[in-house]
Image (cartoon, grey):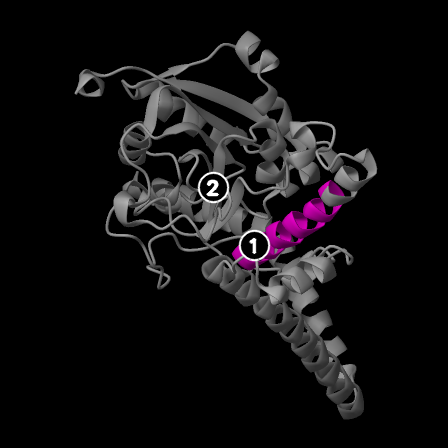
Amino acid sequence: MKKKISSHITSNHSISNLNQKPFLTAIMSEATDKQKQVSAETPLERDLKSKQQSIAATKRKQYRDDKSQIRKQARFEVSTTPEPEQSDSSVATTTSTTTITELPKKRYYRQRAHSNPFSDHRLEYPKSPESMDWSNLYPKQYDISKVEIADIGCGYGGLMIKLGPQFPKSLILGLEIRVQVTQYVEDRIIALRKNQEIINDKKKKESGDGTGDGDDNDYSYQNIAVLRGNAMKFLPNFFVKGQLSKMFFCFPDPHFKQRKHKARIITNTLLSEYAYVLRKGGVVYTITDVEDLHNWMVKHLDEHPLFERLSKEWEDQDKCVEIMYNATEEGQKVTRNKGSKWVACYKRLPSPDDCE
């Protein structure tokens, strides 16, 4: 009997090896083709290729360095806030209102999509929400209201830029862990603010009375900002209890491998933190093109006592859901590839602690 079983296992093993053989052969042949291609290159061609790569890398770095100087100048202007009677400030405003700032080019900021959320990444965090200085991020609106909308893992900032005009009186913050992507969003916001101020000034001059046509003309992206941070670690360091009204999780990293599931942005522990910073009646928005991740998020949100799923009818009527579908770069990519998108929205339920 043992001999039969062993022979059966051996035969199955040999069959599986036979099934895997074409696949392995294809991989090996592809690798050898690449080796042949590399070996076929002459030393002169390899030298030319390496020089081209070096020039491209230098060009990307130079572009980001130039934008970095603009960011530093913008922060300096915010921190100094010159007096109105100074002649230098009037000169600066006249020159800034005549030239349109070029929007940053995304290809110079590309960075791999995956980042280890458990690494500290040398990030800086406030000790408490009260010690957080928002004036550098929202120089014209930080004293009007607190941050109410958070885009977790904002990517290249498409959602924030679309939401900004819809909620002009609310401060919107994007949290992104990747360095170069955060720099891109910051440069994009700086350019949008400058350009919109130029457009607003022109409209006021054309109207004759210097007031423009209405409040909509005064919008200049002053209510959106980006911050490099890890939402999985220190979210309560930025927001007090019940501060946020909306939280967006758009196309988060699916972390396909089972051993990586602990790095997903929606877990039981993290949901308790989100419930802490969300006010009663606040909404969690989730969207993904990975059905397995969608089911994971729905399962954990359904199991949490402080969240209740909103109906499909509510989703169809909510303008944020409509914006969320195609505002982000990932969402646009899925649309181009004719892929599927799964949406789930949850309302923050009241808890006994909310009465305190």
Q: Nearer the viewer, residue 28 or 216?
A: 216
Q: Quadrant of residue 265?
A: top left
Label ID, residue 186: 1
Label ID, residue 227: none
* Residue underneath mark 2: 173
Q: Quadrant of residue 222?
A: top right
Identify which amino acid the numbered label 2 is placed on.
Leu
Counting residues from the N terminus, which is met first, the one under dot 2 or under dot 1?
2
Q: Residue at x 55, y 59 (%)?
A: 183
Is residue 192 depicted above or below 217 in this figure? below
> Element under label 1?
helix
Identify which amino acid the numbered label 1 is placed on.
Glu
Report the number of discs: 2
Q: Residue at x 31, y 20 (%)?
A: 303
* Label 1 Cα neighbours within 10 Å, binned few <14 / some 14-19 / many ≥20: many
Q: Residue furthest bottom?
A: 43
**Boundaries of the magenta span:** 181-200
